[in-house]
Amino acid sequence: MAPRAFITGLSGLTLTADERAFVREARPWGLILFKRNIQDKAQVSALVDEALHELGAAAPVLIDQEGGRVQRLGPPHWPAYPPGRAYGAIYHRDRTAGLAAARLGARLIAADLAELGINVDCLPLADVPVAGSDQIIGDRAYGDTPEQVAALAAAIADGLMDGAVLPVLKHIPGHGRANADSHLKLPVVDADRATLEASDFAAFRPLNKLPLGMTAHVVFTAIDPVQPATTSATIISQVIRGFIGFDGLLMGDDVSMGALAGTIAERARASLTAGCDLVLHCNGKLDEMRAVAAEAPELSGAGKRRAAAALAVRKSPSGIDLPAARREFAAMMNSGIA
């Protein structure tokens, strides 16, 4: 049977009996892990194996592993990685060195994830921050120009894919100008369309061939004065699929975030109706998971095609001497700090 058009979170360190039954019966396209699901390497691997036993061995397992503030896996069991701004600082002084550092950092993250059976990372960001915007993006960004952001995001995507991990481009069509943290409330951006196309949206255009993307819970009043990108058919069709030209599999950002209005079922339905291929639900609350599943049809049509195309991008990891690569990466970052 075909998977359904949603990605689900889980509640804890092991799969509960109710979650096992839910995953088996609801058939989400994939699952996403958070810190509440992570203790150590053996536990994470066991949880992933448990879930994939129900979903199928090829099912996507996602995580947010950026580095800096957004790093679900961390010490003492996994290395700490720098925030995106660190790559931008190196790039600013030496473009080639910055791209090399970004690619290698992502390749090392991919090695960490692949060891656990995690095969999708919600990275890279192509958000371009501006002065006065909310700091939810802040040092996660790779720079403050679309050209630099796009170049470093491409290097990070390449590093992940070189390690057999699929990247998720976020937050389309741009969260950098947002005046609020969308985890808490709805950001509203009043910039005119020409400004957005020259800056915010422009950073995503060179990345439009990436296999997976995630929308921003942000209102752009010049295009749709009411609905955020996730639930705006206008923004998805005119900007994400149109101006940016993104044809990958598109998921909304977490449907349980504070930016969205309505019940969980209403939010899921609105995002799918607007043109998202998948609903992303992250908090691991089983009643909400069931409500999302009830709204999510089987993947079909363009969504099914995009899902198959995304999974087809996965390849075997390139050979790498991990200890040597980690030493090289540490030297790059120490040089960047100096």
Image (cartoon, rainbow, N blue to C red):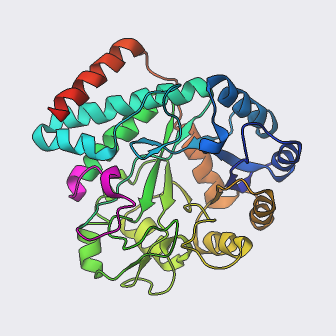
Q: Residue at x 64, y 32 (%)?
A: 39
Residue at the outermost front position: 76
Q: Is 119 rendered above or below residue 128? A: above
| Residue 315 appears in the rendering | no
Picture residue at 33% right of the left edge, 28% below the top: 104
Q: Quadrant of residue 105?
A: top left
Q: Does the magenta stretch include residue 146?
A: yes
Does residue 295 lie above or below 36 as drawn? Answer: below
Q: In this view, does 323 lie to the left or right of 95?
A: right
Who is closer to the viewer here, 2 or 70?
70
Residue 57: percent from the left, percent from the top? 72, 32
Q: Can residue 285 be seen in this view?
A: yes
Residue numbers of the magenta segment: 131-148
Residue 52 coordinates in the image, percent (x, y): 74, 35
Count of numbered circles on the image: 0
Q: Where is residue 96 in the image (x, y as percent from the top left)?
A: 17, 34
Q: Quadrant of residue 301?
A: bottom right
Identify the main secondary structure in magenta.
Answer: loop
Residue drawn at x 31%, y 52% is 139
Position of 79 with respect to 202 (left or right) is: right
